[in-house]
Image: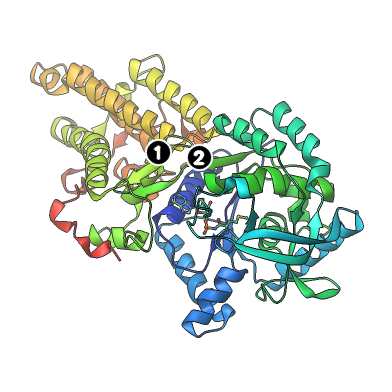
């Protein structure tokens, strides 16, 4: 039985355009889901946009347009960016979708009926940037929000509150007894500490402070707090309904992983879990918190003028396909760690790994095959599965799968590249050109077979990062573009004439430094 795999990403705020921080998460998620699809037919990826809240209301007002006009405009910007980056999601949800809004109301009602929501008057320090109340002890020395460096407003409101404290012990117990729940595990203590001081949370705002949101059922003076609205997308998108959940919901839920940034881990591993407990739903199997991407070692910000859109990187480097950018971003940081983007690094990394290492390996081996064997792999070239290259391939495959099970996307890429590195060394050590010169044609042919069969393995394993390059490699090996892991066995490369001189093309052209301009800074 193939297991299903349901992956969700954070849903992006549409009060601006997508930048490479948003892109980082979607690329990581896409690489994971493409890898899972290599193993199962039941892998499903959900992404989306978070469209309610005071920030969107204010941005729209400043532009003189309605909130939904702003949402429509920016949503299409996100959709376009994901298309260009070949993010292969199965579904994209908007929190302004009617179906979502209707179900969020039902969810709110169910929490109320369960006795987990109550009305209460509250005075607190509200940060519009975070869209949440902050504790005085979390502010900077100057009394500012640590994330937005703005003074929070003191607000008194009568709101609905969710009994988070009721679930505190149960959540702590769950986290402790499920070591794979929060990834990477270095985040576990941070969450357990935050749980210690947790209080009930306000889950609505008065309409006078936030108009742009979903109305609380049977109370037109209040809107539902944006986080309840946003988090619920993971279940509303696939047809959750408290009365009659859809077949799709029954098949996909619980999520196998929520991929999110480290800044929103508290909302996912505490608030969301409590809501699910209250609804009586199974809990997600894991929450993977990735790190943050900086630009030239600085935090991306509008005021610094260093916000980069993924499209601008592709344009600046004249890239028709997103493979190099996807590869660079997916390997920019080890699992859960912060990473950095710089033009220089980008060029160096993709030139070294994709052009010099993987690309040249294929190119020179195919050229030798043409030169010595007229492009033909003879049947007696096939080596057995105990050859050094075969063992390396099989070990790499096992380790790559293990990495992905731990959401170690960059680590898996490193393994694939280091496999290619080892095969390059194998070519140098075996010197097939010398074997040919000495007339040892069978030995020479066997070396070439090993290298090309290793290339077939590399194409399949690198596919989630670089789908176009991978397809190009398989085409040049005269193989069809089938990237399933069931094809990863030694000896799969078909013999016979596989290429000729003018069919051999570089799979990735080195990035020329003159392409790098500063037109992407904007
Ligand atoms: N709308 C909320 C998420 C709700 S999920 C139910 C939100 N939106 S966001 O647009 O601010 O961020 C979307 C995702 O992008 C988050 O996971 C966030 O961590 C991630 N990133 C935003 N900037 C980032 C970087 N500079 N680097 C890496 N990821 C970043 O939060």
Depth check: give the residue in front, 367 or 171. Answer: 171
Q: How many marks?
A: 2
Q: What residue is disc 2 on?
A: 484
Q: Residue furthest bottom?
A: 64
Binning the other alpha carbons within 10 Å of mark 1 as few (below 14), some (14 to 19) or many (20 upward) gives: many
Rendered view: 407 above or below 308? above
Residue in front for this viewpoint, 401 or 196: 196
At 65% from the left and 75% from the top, the residue drawn is: 212
In this picture the colour scheme is: rainbow
In this view of the protein, can residue 16 be seen by the observer?
yes
Horizontal and vertical percent position of residue 198: 72, 43
Residue 44: x, y in percent? Answer: 61, 50
Q: Which mark is residue 385?
A: none
Say which of marks 1 and 2 sits in front: 1
Query: Residue, x 43% and y 32% (percent of image)?
Result: 412
Q: Position of residue 35 (x, y in %)?
A: 50, 41
Q: Residue at x 27, y 27 (%)?
A: 421
Question: Tag 2: Cα neighbours inside 10 Å, few (<14), some, or many (≥20)?
Answer: some
Residue 59 left/right relative to 435: right
Q: Is residue 123 left or right of residue 10?
A: right
Image quadrant containing the N terminus: top right
Locate residue 84: give its quadrant: bottom left
For disc 1, the marked residue is: 333
**Residue in the image at 71% along x and 48% along y:** 271
């Amino acid at each position: 039985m193939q297991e299903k795999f349901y992956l969700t990403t954070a849903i992006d705020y549409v009060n601006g355009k997508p930048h490479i921080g948003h892109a980082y998460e979607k690329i990581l998620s896409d690489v994971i889901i493409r890898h899972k699809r290599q193993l199962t037919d039941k892998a499903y990826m959900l992404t989306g946009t978070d469209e309610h809240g005071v920030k969107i209301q204010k941005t729209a007002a400043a532009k003189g347009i309605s909130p939904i006009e702003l949402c429509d405009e920016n949503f299409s910007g996100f959709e376009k960016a994901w298309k260009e980056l070949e993010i292969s999601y199965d579904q994209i949800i908007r929190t302004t979708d009617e179906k979502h809004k209707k179900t969020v109301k039902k969810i709110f009602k169910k929490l109320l009926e369960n006795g987990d929501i109550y009305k209460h008057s509250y005075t607190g320090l509200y940060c519009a940037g975070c869209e949440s109340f902050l504790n005085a002890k979390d502010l900077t020395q100057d009394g500012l929000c640590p994330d937005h460096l703005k003074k929070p407003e003191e607000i008194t409101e009568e709101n609905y509150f969710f009994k988070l404290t009721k679930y505190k012990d149960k959540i702590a117990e769950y986290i402790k007894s499920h070591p794979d729940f929060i990834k990477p595990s270095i985040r576990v203590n941070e969450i357990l500490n935050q749980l210690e001081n947790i209080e009930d949370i306000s889950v609505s705002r008065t309409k006078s402070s936030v108009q742009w949101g979903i109305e609380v059922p049977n109370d037109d003076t209040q809107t539902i707090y944006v986080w309840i609205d946003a988090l619920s997308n993971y279940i509303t998108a696939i047809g959750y309904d408290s009365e009659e959940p859809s077949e799709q919901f029954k098949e996909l839920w619980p999520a196998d992983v929520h991929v999110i940034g480290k800044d929103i881990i508290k909302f996912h591993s505490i608030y969301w879990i409590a809501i699910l407990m209250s609804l009586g739903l199974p809990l997600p199997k894991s929450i993977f918190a990735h790190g943050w991407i900086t630009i030239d070692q600085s935090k991306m910000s509008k005021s610094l003028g260093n916000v980069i859109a993924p499209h601008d990187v592709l344009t600046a480097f004249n890239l028709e396909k997103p493979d190099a950018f996807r590869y660079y971003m997916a390997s920019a940081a080890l699992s859960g760690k912060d990473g950095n983007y710089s033009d220089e690094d980008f060029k160096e990394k993709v030139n070294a790994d994709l052009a010099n290492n993987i690309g040249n390996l294929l190119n020179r081996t195919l050229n030798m095959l043409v030169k010595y064997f007229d492009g033909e792999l003879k049947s007696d070239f096939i080596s057995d599965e105990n050859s050094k290259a075969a063992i390396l391939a099989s070990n790499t495959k096992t380790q790559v799968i293990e990495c992905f099970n731990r959401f170690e996307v960059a680590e898996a890429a490193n393994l694939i590249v280091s496999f290619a590195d080892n095969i390059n060394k194998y070519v140098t050590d075996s010197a097939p050109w010398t074997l040919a010169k000495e007339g040892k044609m069978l030995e020479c042919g066997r070396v070439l077979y090993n290298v090309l069969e290793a290339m077939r393995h590399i194409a399949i394993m690198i596919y989630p990062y670089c789908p176009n390059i991978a397809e190009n490699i398989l085409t040049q090996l005269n193989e069809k573009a089938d990237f399933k892991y069931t094809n990863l066995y030694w000896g799969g490369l078909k013999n016979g004439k596989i290429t000729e001189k003018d069919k051999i093309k570089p799979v990735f052209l080195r990035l020329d430094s003159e392409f790098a301009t500063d037109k992407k800074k904007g």
